[in-house]
Every structure is written in structure tokens, then in C-alpha cells.
Image (spheres, rainbow, N blue to C red):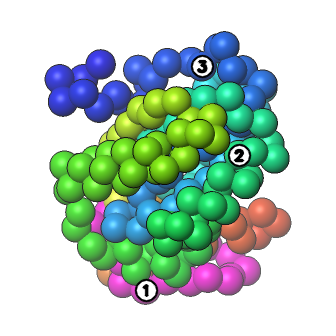
């Protein structure tokens, strides 16, 4: 465990005793907050849930411990979203806009920890027992600026200079372009890594 009490992603416990269960989480992408649920063993890995957080580009995540099956985790996801106003999804253009904001690790961890405490207090009777904070932002490469964003495209041309979740950053001449990674499948990529 890190000195500040926040676990780095690679130090997180494996949750072996709840291998086939659902995991409820709240995550932050800069100043945006969302609630979600995923399988603990996503991708047939005991830590497969971490891949889900990285795919979404989440900077900080709180995972809740408890015995949750799929119906209960989906019910809690909806109830938390409704009660606290947390999004259930953050889209590409919301992410690009948020990337322009500077939010410190301390601010994110403090906010998400307080939010987790309120969620745990409110929904403990629904099977939530405890929570853990993971900090993930160090797993991404952000070029520092975005000149414009492209949601749909036929090809990517340029030098890949970073990524965060579904956002791919490509240098195209003097510009940094943010591409929606969700459109990569089946597209021509002429980018240099």
C-alpha cells in the first residue's frame, strides 16, 4: 500500500474470493464522475476489471467490496446514478472537453473517497461492505494539449503521441488531434508509433 493510503493499480488485491461476481465502482475522468459495474473476472483474468477501467480512461476509481450478482450490481448502479447524479457513461466529446482541465491527484482522490463514503453509508444494506481507491492516471500518455477532435473518420494519418481510454492522440503536422478510439475497428491507420 502506498504511503498516502491509495493503492497503485498493480498493487490492488486480486479479489480471488469473489472471482465470478460483479464489481461495482465509481470512477473519475478528470472532473467527470461515473458509476459502473463489471465482472471481476472480465477477460478470464482475476484482475480483468482493471482492464475495464483502463479502457474507459479513468484517472481514479473506487471499487466496492461485497457479494454482488449481476441483477444487484445493475440495480445499485442505477440507484447510485439517480441518487448522487453520477453518469453511467462518459462519451468521447465529454472526455475531450474534460482533458483540457487540470485536476490534481489529491483533489480526485479526496472527492472520490468522500463520494464512496456516502455511497457506502447509503447502500450498505444492499451488500456493500467496504471500498478501495485505485489511481490509474499514470498509465496514460497525454500530450498536454488537443487542437481539435475527430469523432468519426475513415483513416488516421500522423504520429501517435498518446492515449487515454478511448481517446487516441495523433500529431498531424503542428496539430494534436484527438480521435475517437471507438471507430478504430475496420479503419485504415497510417500512424507511426
Q: Farthest residue to the top: give it.
A: 17
Q: Is residue 89 above or below residue 175?
A: above
**Disc number lying in front (1 or 2):** 2
**Direction from residue 115 to residue 43 in the image, left or right:** right
Q: How far, Cα to Cα, is label 1 from label 2?
A: 37 Å
Going 21% across and 55% down the picture, which residue do you hit?
Answer: 107
Q: How far, Cα to Cα, is label 2 from label 3?
A: 16 Å
Query: For the residue labelled by badge 3, is the local secondary structure a helix, a strand or a loop?
Result: loop
Could you classify mark 2 by the number of other residues whose Cα lies within 10 Å: few (under 14), some (14-19), or many (20 or more)?
many
Q: Which residues are magenta?
A: 143-158
Which one is nearer the viewer's eye here, 53 or 192? 53
x then y, percent, for residue 140: 41, 49
Q: Which residue is mark 2?
A: 73
Q: Specify the label residue 148 is tagged with.
A: 1
**Direction from residue 172 to residue 102 in the image, left or right:** left
- The quadrant of the picture occupied by the N terminus is top left
Q: How far, Cα to Cα, is label 3 from label 1?
A: 40 Å
Q: Quadrant of residue 18?
A: top right
Could you classify mark 3 by the number of other residues whose Cα lies within 10 Å: few (under 14), some (14-19), or many (20 or more)?
some
Q: Is residue 108 visible?
A: no
x then y, percent, for residue 141: 37, 52
- Going from N to C along the chain, the mark reached first, 1 or 2, is 2
- Going from N to C along the chain, the mark reached first, 2 or 3, is 3
Does the magenta portion include 150?
yes
x then y, percent, for residue 98: 38, 74
**Disc number lying in front (3 or 1):** 3
Which one is nearer the viewer's eye here, 133 or 154? 133
Amino acid at each position: 500500500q502506498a504511503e498516502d493510503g491509495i493503492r497503485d493499480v498493480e498493487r490492488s488485491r486480486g479479489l480471488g474470493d469473489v472471482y465470478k461476481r460483479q464489481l461495482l465502482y465509481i470512477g473519475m475522468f478528470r472532473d467527470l464522475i461515473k458509476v459502473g459495474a463489471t465482472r471481476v473476472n472480465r477477460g478470464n483474468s482475476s484482475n480483468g476489471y482493471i482492464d475495464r477501467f483502463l479502457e474507459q480512461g479513468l484517472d481514479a476509481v473506487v471499487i466496492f467490496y461485497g457479494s454482488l450478482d449481476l441483477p444487484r450490481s445493475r440495480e445499485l448502479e442505477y440507484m447510485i446514478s439517480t441518487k448522487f447524479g453520477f453518469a453511467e457513461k462518459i462519451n468521447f466529446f465529454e472526455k475531450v472537453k474534460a482533458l483540457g482541465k487540470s485536476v490534481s491527484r489529491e483533489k480526485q482522490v479526496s472527492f472520490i473517497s468522500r463520494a464512496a463514503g456516502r455511497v457506502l453509508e447509503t447502500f450498505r444494506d444492499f451488500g456493500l461492505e467496504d471500498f478501495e481507491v485505485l489511481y490509474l492516471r499514470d498509465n496514460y500518455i497525454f500530450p498536454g494539449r488537443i487542437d481539435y477532435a475527430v469523432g468519426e473518420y475513415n483513416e488516421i494519418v500522423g504520429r501517435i503521441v498518446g492515449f487515454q481510454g478511448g481517446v487516441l492522440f495523433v500529431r498531424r503536422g503542428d496539430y494534436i488531434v484527438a480521435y475517437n478510439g471507438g471507430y478504430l475497428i475496420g479503419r485504415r491507420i497510417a500512424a507511426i508509433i
